[in-house]
Image (tube, rainbow, N blue to C red):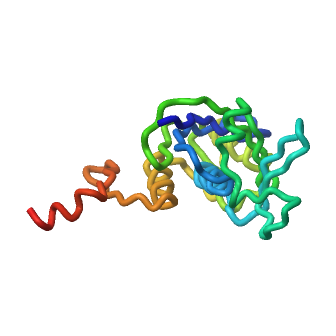
Amino acid sequence: MDGYKIRVILDNVDITTARTVLLPRNISCKTLHEIICILFNLDKNKKYKFPFEDIGLIIQDTGSLNRDRIDSRFEIVDEYFLAYSEIKYLNSFWNLRIIINHVEYEKKYPEIIGIEGKYNPSNEIFWPEDFSDALNLKVNEKIHNEKLLKRVKIQDIQEHLLLLFKIPYAIENKKIIIINQESILDNYFN
């Protein structure tokens, strides 16, 4: 089955902050928005959009069934991922780029496979410039406010992605184990 390997890059930040994720096909733009919010600790309730300036199109959560607007809840990413190698995503004051590659991917949930940049903005940072300043202070080992940066843990992100897709899992020896739904009843009868 085909899927996607995307690299999501936080723009307007001095230190590269990016996440690489494997995605299944047939997810909505709204689900992609929720995935990005998990990857970067962004507020999923803020206004967001996927602008396609070359064709004058904006996909966003309209909250209505207006035929003149494309609602992210109902629009599937596949058509855009096949047509573009890179798309934009805007969430409030945050600008992100999504670089798209096509890969074989059999799973029905996203899987984080790479992190560039050890920190995400905390809930107290609202501007990319403030995040850049906090990162620069951290890198230069100057005094900074620990509340401004949230250290990224790949396992925490993966757990949130599994919860988003309602995939049952367990933690064994500090590793995520996906629970096979089909064999659960077999355990009770054997």
Q: What residue lies at 84% left-to-right and 50% top-to-bottom? A: 58
* Residue 121 shown left or right of residue 190 in the figure: right
Q: Quadrant of residue 123?
A: bottom right
Question: Residue 126, image x and y in percent?
Answer: 76, 57
Whether residue 121 appears in this view of the structure is no
Q: What residue lies at 50% left-to-right and 46% top-to-bottom? A: 110
Against 74, residue 58 (above or below) is above
Question: Residue 112, image x and y in percent?
Answer: 50, 42
Against 24, residue 127 (above or below) is below
Seen as rendered, the residue at the extreme bottom is 64
- Taking depth in this image into account, of 143 and 39 the one nearest to the observer is 39
In which quadrant is the C terminus drawn? bottom left
- Taking depth in this image into account, of 137 and 43 the one nearest to the observer is 43
Seen as rendered, the residue at the extreme front is 67
- Marker count (numbered): 0
Q: What residue lies at 58% left-to-right and 30% top-to-bottom? A: 102
Question: Residue 48, image x and y in percent?
Answer: 77, 56
Whether residue 105 appears in this view of the structure is yes
Q: Quadrant of residue 71?
A: bottom right
Against 101, residue 21 (above or below) is below
Q: What residue lies at 67% left-to-right and 57% top-to-bottom? A: 30
* Residue 184 shown left or right of residue 53 in the figure: left
